[in-house]
């Protein structure tokens, strides 16, 4: 008979493995209507983004990986959309993160200085935790430009009843900003 402690450990490890390698989502995998609605709400523009694939330099990967809080692997490239609105550019970076038992997709919006303009949850599949898309939570990220600033329960406050999702989106944005700050966005 397997001791209870070993059984609990095995169940915990197996329960975490499906969430171990969340990577970025490709723009064609995001529902275009939701993305279009999000872009208009955040940027005020109805312009479709022009998409680029930005390579993540190999020499940047080791230092980044040591600082990751959620992601287990570093992508070879990231997908970045660009929306020009007058003289300003908004860079749009779609990503995915885990909630309690599902994944959700969100978009990170940054300006030319790599400062966060907004985050927007596009698809959330659970009945709890959706509060991470409320403006009072999202505005906590605004203006941050360094991953080190993005800290759960420090600079980003928790939401009662949405702890897992709030922590995971905070850590996902932290990890994505580590990458964003080491690559050119154009």
Image: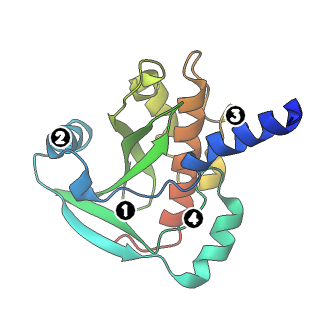
N-terminal of the pair, mark 2 or mark 3, is: 2
Spatial distance from mark 4 to mark 1, Cα to Cα?
26 Å
Categorize mark 3 by other alpha carbons within 10 Å: few (<14), some (14-19), many (20+). few
Residue placed under numbered mark 1 in the picture: 112
Residue placed under numbered mark 4 in the picture: 73
Residue placed under numbered mark 2 in the picture: 40
Spatial distance from mark 2 to mark 3, Cα to Cα?
30 Å
Chosen colour scheme: rainbow
- Quadrant position of the N terminus in the picture: top right
Spatial distance from mark 2 to mark 1, Cα to Cα?
18 Å
Q: Secondary structure at mark 3?
A: loop
**Count of marks, rendered view:** 4
Categorize mark 1 by other alpha carbons within 10 Å: few (<14), some (14-19), many (20+). few
Q: Position of residue 48 (x, y in %)?
A: 12, 55
- Eyeballing the image, is 52 above or below 112? below
Q: Nearer the viewer, mark 2 or mark 1?
A: 2
Q: Residue at x 36, y 55 (%)?
A: 25
Q: Position of residue 153 (x, y in %)?
A: 68, 31
Spatial distance from mark 3 to mark 4, Cα to Cα?
25 Å
Categorize mark 4 by other alpha carbons within 10 Å: few (<14), some (14-19), many (20+). some
């Amino acid at each position: 008979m397997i001791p209870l402690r070993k059984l609990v450990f095995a169940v915990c490890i197996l329960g975490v493995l499906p969430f171990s390698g969340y990577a970025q989502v490709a723009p064609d995998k995001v529902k275009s209507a939701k993305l279009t609605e999000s872009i208009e709400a955040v940027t005020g523009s109805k312009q479709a983004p022009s998409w680029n694939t930005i390579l993540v330099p190999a020499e940047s990967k080791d230092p980044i990986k040591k600082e990751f809080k959620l992601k287990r692997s570093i992508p070879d490239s990231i997908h970045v959309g660009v929306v020009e609105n007058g003289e300003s550019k908004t860079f749009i970076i779609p990503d995915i993160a885990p909630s309690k038992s599902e994944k959700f997709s969100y978009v990170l919006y940054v300006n030319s200085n790599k400062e966060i303009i907004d985050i927007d949850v596009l698809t959330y599949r659970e009945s709890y935790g959706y509060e991470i898309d409320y403006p009072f939570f999202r505005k906590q990220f605004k203006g941050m430009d360094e991953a080190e600033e993005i800290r759960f329960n420090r600079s980003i406050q928790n939401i009662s009843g949405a702890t897992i999702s709030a922590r995971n989106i905070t850590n996902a944005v932290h990890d994505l900003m580590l990458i964003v700050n080491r690559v050119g966005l154009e």
